[in-house]
Image (cartoon, rainbow, N blue to C red):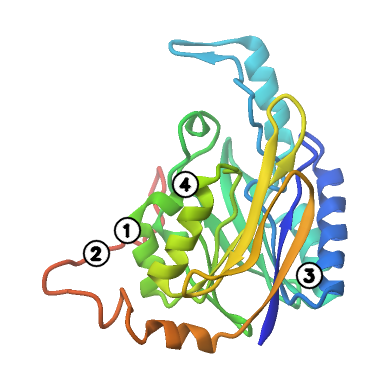
């Protein structure tokens, strides 16, 4: 048995140092409840600029929008860099595995990324979002298959699938084939239908699903909806709305084998004679 936690909280947009302080405090709170793995929401470090247009309409961008993007760019983090080192120090001090969304700055491009830190504080995983959704494509670049890893940890095999990537069936299948046991779904999607998606994935993949949703107030609020589900779709931590919170659950990895008794979509329930999936895991760069 291991206790896991999801943190429902909002970034301090355009103030990454303040956001890191929130991360440290919430990580301490979750660790105090016995959590060994702690998941934070999508874009937590660096922020999700919901409602920001960045001065863009079809065919033109405004000087004010460029200034707004410059401010957002300045709040993003290098990987590795001083901000990731700070998160690693928090993980090491508490002896926990931290998974957090971050806005990664690489060259002149931003990526919506999820970072994994082990109990020693080492950065052991980086996932870049493959397909930013809608207007996100203006401010974030697209990841490639080189970061589609399932990471072995003392708590189980962990993978991260970000927000609407969870609506990409082939990406989910790649995670199932990797043997994911703790399926992390950081997001800002606060719709009621998100819970249906999370429960479906738990049932489909016969895995534990942890979803951490931002909670923010203001002109474009995000109302939360963090939750934890078991391999048969059972609700282990009910969705919470309207406040910041830490949700925890005790999980038994043995429940995964019991669930896969009658459904293993990457094993005995697959039909490779009919369907196959090829995943290109090569890093793609503009210049070789």
Observer-nearest of 127 and 232? 232
Q: Does residue 241 appear left or right of residue 171 in this picture?
A: right
Which mark is first along the chain, 2 or 3?
3
Residue positioned 82% across, 51% down in the render: 20
- Point out residue 185 in the picture as x, y percentages from the top left corner: 55, 58
The residue carrying pointer 2 sits among few (fewer than 14), some (14 to 19) or many (20 or more) residues within 10 Å by Cα, namely few
How far apart, in angstroms, are the residues tagged by discs 3 and 4? 27 Å
First in residue order: circle 3 vs circle 1: 3
At 50% from the left and 58% from the top, the residue drawn is: 198
Q: Which residue is mark 3?
A: 91
| Earlier residue among tags 3 and 4 | 3
x 80%, y 39%: residue: 12
User: Disc 2 versus disc 1: distance between alpha carbons?
Assistant: 7 Å
Nearest to N terminus: mark 2 or mark 1: 1
Q: Depth check: 205 or 233 in front?
A: 233
Task: Report the side of 176 relative to 56 (left or right).
Answer: left
Q: Secondary structure at mark 3?
A: helix
**Mark 1 and mark 2 in contact (Cβ < 8 Å)?**
yes
**Residue tagged by mark 1?**
170
**Residue 231: percent from left, percent from top:** 48, 75
Q: CA distance from mark 4 to mark 2?
A: 20 Å
Q: Residues within 10 Å of mark 4 (few under 14, many from 20)?
A: some
Secondary structure under the numbered disc 4 in the rendered image: helix
Asked if residue 262 is positioned above or below residue 235 in the image, the reply reads below
Q: Is residue 212 visible?
A: no
Circle number at residue 277 = 2
User: Mark 4 = which residue?
Assistant: 164
Q: Is residue 82 above or below residue 180?
A: above
């Amino acid at each position: 048995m291991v206790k896991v936690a999801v943190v429902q909280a909002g970034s301090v947009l355009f103030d990454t140092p303040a956001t890191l302080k929130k991360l440290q405090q919430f990580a301490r709170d979750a660790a105090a409840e016995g959590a060994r793995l702690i998941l934070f929401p999508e874009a937590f470090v660096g922020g999700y600029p919901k409602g920001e247009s960045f001065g863009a309409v079809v065919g033109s961008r405004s000087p004010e929008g460029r200034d707004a993007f410059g401010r957002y760019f300045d709040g993003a983090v290098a990987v590795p860099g001083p901000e990731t080192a700070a998160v690693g120090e928090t993980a090491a001090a508490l002896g926990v595995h931290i998974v957090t969304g971050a806005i990664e700055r690489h060259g002149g491009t931003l990526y919506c990324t999820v970072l994994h830190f082990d109990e020693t504080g080492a950065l052991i995983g980086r996932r870049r979002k493959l397909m930013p959704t809608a207007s996100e494509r203006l401010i974030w670049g697209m990841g490639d298959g080189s970061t589609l890893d399932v990471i072995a940890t003392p708590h189980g095999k962990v993978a991260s699938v970000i927000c609407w990537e969870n609506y990409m069936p082939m990406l989910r299948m790649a995670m199932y084939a990797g043997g994911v046991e703790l399926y992390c779904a950081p997001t800002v999607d606060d719709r009621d239908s998100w819970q249906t998606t999370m429960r479906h994935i738990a049932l489909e993949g016969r895995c534990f699903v942890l979803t951490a949703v931002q909670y923010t107030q203001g002109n474009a609020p995000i109302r939360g909806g963090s939750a934890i589900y078991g391999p048969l779709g059972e609700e282990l931590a009910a969705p919470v709305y309207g406040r910041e919170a830490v949700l925890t659950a005790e999980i038994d990895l043995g429940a995964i084998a019991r669930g896969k008794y009658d459904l293993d979509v990457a094993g005995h329930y697959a039909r490779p004679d009919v369907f196959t999936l090829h995943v290109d895991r090569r890093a793609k760069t503009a210049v070789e």
